[in-house]
Image: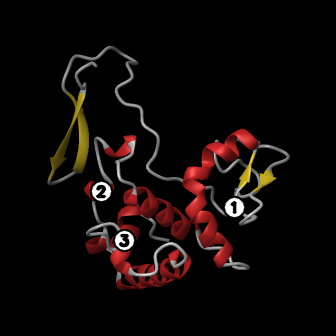
């Protein structure tokens, strides 16, 4: 295995970042990682596959929640490990559909609850993300409080008690770290 070509650093003025620790060639790939979590926005729902994000004319709908859509059985099968817990939550909130930010944070929480960190968390974890709480107006904070309540209603099929959340996880802070500040 090659030694890493980048390292993380923190700057008081600029926050967290990555910097090269070895000579680099132009165009050299330094890091590749799948995202910790992603979700199709409500605006794009039904137009792109929930797994590969490719646009298709005809998509197959999840037979359980009837929300997630896939371009084929292969994508649906690959998506199942990430979708199975979300599927229960989506079924429980019918006929209403949760805001994109709630669905995304739900996927983040499920990933953080897994025993082994995802590939994307090996260099930076969700907990390394900078919180934006101190930069928010009171109106924005109130909006995040409302999202936190919506999130608790959405995720209740999977997490009935806040003690079941990942250690040191705060829902309000989670929204602030996601940068979802509508």
Say whether residue 163 is left or right of residue 152.
Answer: left
Which quadrant: the N terminus?
top left
The local secondary structure at tag 2 comes to: loop
Question: What residue does disc 3 label?
Answer: 165
Question: Which residue is painted at 63% across and 46% down in the image?
Answer: 51
Q: From this viewpoint, is residue 53 visible?
A: no
Q: Is residue 99 above or below residue 116?
A: below
Name the outermost residue toward the front. Answer: 115
Tally of marks: 3
How is the rendered protein coloured?
Answer: secondary structure
Question: What residue does disc 1 label?
Answer: 43
Q: Is residue 68 above or below residue 139?
A: above
Residue 131 appears at what percent x and percent y? 29, 65
The local secondary structure at tag 1 comes to: loop
Q: Mark 1–mark 3 contact, CB under 8 Å?
A: no
Sequence-wise, which precedes: disc 1 or disc 3? 1
- Quarter of the view holding residue 67: bottom right
Q: Is residue 20 above or below residue 74?
A: above
Q: Mark 3–mark 2 contact, CB under 8 Å?
A: no
Per the model, the C-alpha gap separating discs 1 and 3 is: 29 Å
Per the model, the C-alpha gap separating discs 2 and 1 is: 27 Å
Q: Tell me, for residue 129, which label it has, or none.
A: 2
Sequence-wise, which precedes: disc 2 or disc 1? 1
Residue 147 appears at what percent x and percent y? 48, 79
Nearest the eye: 95 or 26: 95
Say whether residue 62 is left or right of residue 100.
Answer: right
- Nearer the observer, disc 3 or disc 2? 3
Per the model, the C-alpha gap separating discs 3 and 2 is: 18 Å
Sequence-wise, which precedes: disc 3 or disc 2? 2
Name the outermost residue toward the top. Answer: 25
């Amino acid at each position: 295995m090659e030694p890493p070509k980048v390292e993380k650093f923190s700057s008081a003025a600029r926050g967290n970042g990555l910097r090269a620790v070895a000579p680099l060639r132009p165009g050299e790939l330094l890091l590749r990682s799948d995202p910790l979590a992603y979700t199709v926005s409500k605006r794009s729902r039904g137009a792109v596959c929930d797994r590969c994000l490719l646009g298709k004319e005809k998509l197959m709908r999840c037979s359980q929640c009837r929300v997630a859509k896939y371009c084929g059985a292969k994508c649906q099968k690959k998506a199942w490990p990430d979708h199975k817990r979300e599927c229960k939550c989506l079924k429980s909130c019918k006929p209403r559909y949760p805001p994109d930010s709630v669905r995304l944070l739900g996927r983040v929480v499920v990933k953080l609850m897994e025993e082994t960190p995802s590939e994307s968390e090996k260099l930076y974890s969700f907990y390394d993300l900078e919180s934006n709480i101190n930069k928010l107006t009171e109106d924005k904070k109130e909006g995040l409080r409302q999202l936190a309540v919506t999130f608790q209603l959405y995720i209740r099929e999977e997490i009935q008690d806040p003690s079941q959340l990942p250690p040191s996880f705060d829902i309000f802070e989670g929204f602030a770290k996601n940068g979802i500040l509508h």
